[in-house]
Image: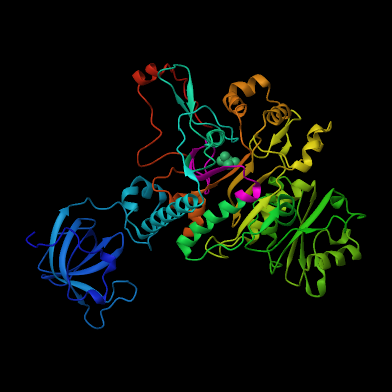
Amino acid sequence: MTDSLPMRTDHCGALRPADIGRRVALCGWMARRREHGEHLAFVDLRDHTGIVQCVVDGSVDVRSEYVLRIVGTVRARPEGTENPNLPTGEVELGECEVEVLNTAAPPPFQLDERVEVDEMVRLAHRYVDLRTDRMQRNLRLRARVNAALRRAMDDQGFVEVETPMLIASTPEGARDFVVPSRLSPGEFYALPQSPQLFKQLCMVGGVDRYYQIARCLRDEDLRADRQFEFMQLDAEASFASQEDVLAFISVAVSAAVEAVTGEAVGDIPRMSWLEAQERFGSDKPDTRFGMELVELTELFAATGFNAFKAPCVKGIRVPGAGDTTRSRLDDLTDRAKRWGAKGLVWMRVKEGGELESPVAKFLSDEELRGLVDTTGAEAGDLLLLVADERHRVWHVLGLLRLELGRPPVTEGGLQFLWVVDFPLFEDLGDDGRPVPAHHPFTMPHPDDVALLDAADPAELLKVRSQSYDLVLNGWELGSGSVRIHRPEIQQRMFGLLGISEQEAQAKFGFLLDAFRFGAPPHAGFAFGIDRLVALLAGEENIREVIAFPKTQSGTDPLTHAPTPIDARHLEELGLRLLPTKKSD
Ligand code: ASP
């Protein structure tokens, strides 16, 4: 090139009428070319900021996705040819000199937001997919969130500490990914499910306030909101209470949201775990919409209808869904059964509050009237009722509510919610032992400690913990707790969970030992950055906000991971493979 301009003076998407008359150098990819006769071509040049039209005299051999440098003069587009859909649509580049910096093979798909491309194809050529507006927007949004989180944590006196990736297991309830050790054949590292134990060790080490944007790995089935590896804002603070944690995490989350939307999150409301279950049938309620669970147990306390003689009867009112077809109702009933219900009772609300249902004839007038009053049903609505054990009623109606009422991810704003007072134990396992709801280092609620000695294991289920979750639009963003910092309470906890002293020593002996050397009271939290970013970006799937994600089956169509390793490598690691089981 003969011009004296730098490689690049401007970005494609940034040119405006104020730039008219300037000679500029742009670099980017060839998005589109239109010939106008033999001697005039319109070339759309694209970089991460957008697209600008370049008018090239003479013929140029440039094809899709060629890498170009174009030097030209910014000028107004001729009247009537402006493109109001393009931020640069009032201007174009004239008197262009085009330099081909690199050629490109034809792209595997069109880089046009309006064209739906199969995800496998996108992922196999992610480097091309990343050039799309959508991916550029999402990656940059993500970077803004990370930067805002770091700033918010730094400002609150937190210190970023990096913890190791090759560790002994951290119990978060999922399966570990393991890495065989070459120097200690037959032994394995686990990849961290979270930095949990290390952040607690940092507290013993006087770090006082720790945070990390941490990669966590869990070998669990993948879903729209779950990948094998994910990023968390992980934090821990010494001499801190639940209130302190809720406050500093709220500040961080609010900063991240503000960095994207320009608006801070106000006070985040709180709800107890029990209230969340009773009202929404979920410990991560989507509070963007109503359709709350209505308590009906009392109403049917003396009912003659056998199906309602249950410890709990609840229902939901689906506004305006009275015309739901019979086959859809059958389908909902099947689902409810698959989710564990014995059945699903439906009722169509008619004019005058009359209820049309196969079971209406088994209910007294008083019960029918009571139903309409309690649920607030109006003509045209649909009522769905489940009777069972209380936990099962919550579960089934909670899922039905989501199925029938959940708005798309882009609607209803950002509804944050703290869910507090979780039970310490989720349930009793098959061995009759309590299963921890969080990890086994969670401090019981001070008022419920006495219950830990209860002879009846069912009483243990009433013990509340000092743990809390942050929920956004029905997605669990993260959780945390006040930790047990005294060895005797920790031993007692392990005892209840059936973890023997030897086992505890073998698994977390290092933590228990550390606690003997002056562990301060501490508490913490971690939340998923992928999920937060996805919701801020209006994406249903976290894969859309991850540069190089895995598919639903845990593979990477780009690098083909996971891949076999050769025999010599196996030998070195002291491993021999069993014949692979064909999946059935
Ligand atoms: N380590 C926990 C998790 O990953 C969060 C915490 O308790 O701080 O869920």
- Which of the image's four quarters has the C terminus? top right
> Residue 424 appears in which quarter of the rendering?
top right
Pick whichever, 170 or 546, lies toward us: 170
Q: Where is 546 relative to 51, above or below?
A: above
**Residue 148 drawn at (x, y percent):** 45, 55
Where is residue 503 drawn, in percent x and y? 64, 21
For the question of whether residue 320 can be seen, the reply is: yes
Residue 356 placement, left or right of 106: right
Assign ligand 1 to one image quadrant: top right
Quarter of the image with the N terminus in it: bottom left
Residue 403 lies in the magenta stretch: no
Q: Locate residue 531, reporting x and y percent.
A: 51, 51
Q: Is residue 462 among what the camera can see?
A: no
Q: Position of residue 64 (x, y in %)?
A: 23, 58
- Magenta range is 216-245
Specify whether 142 is left or right of 379.
Answer: left
Q: Vertical placement of 143 versus 463: above or below?
A: below
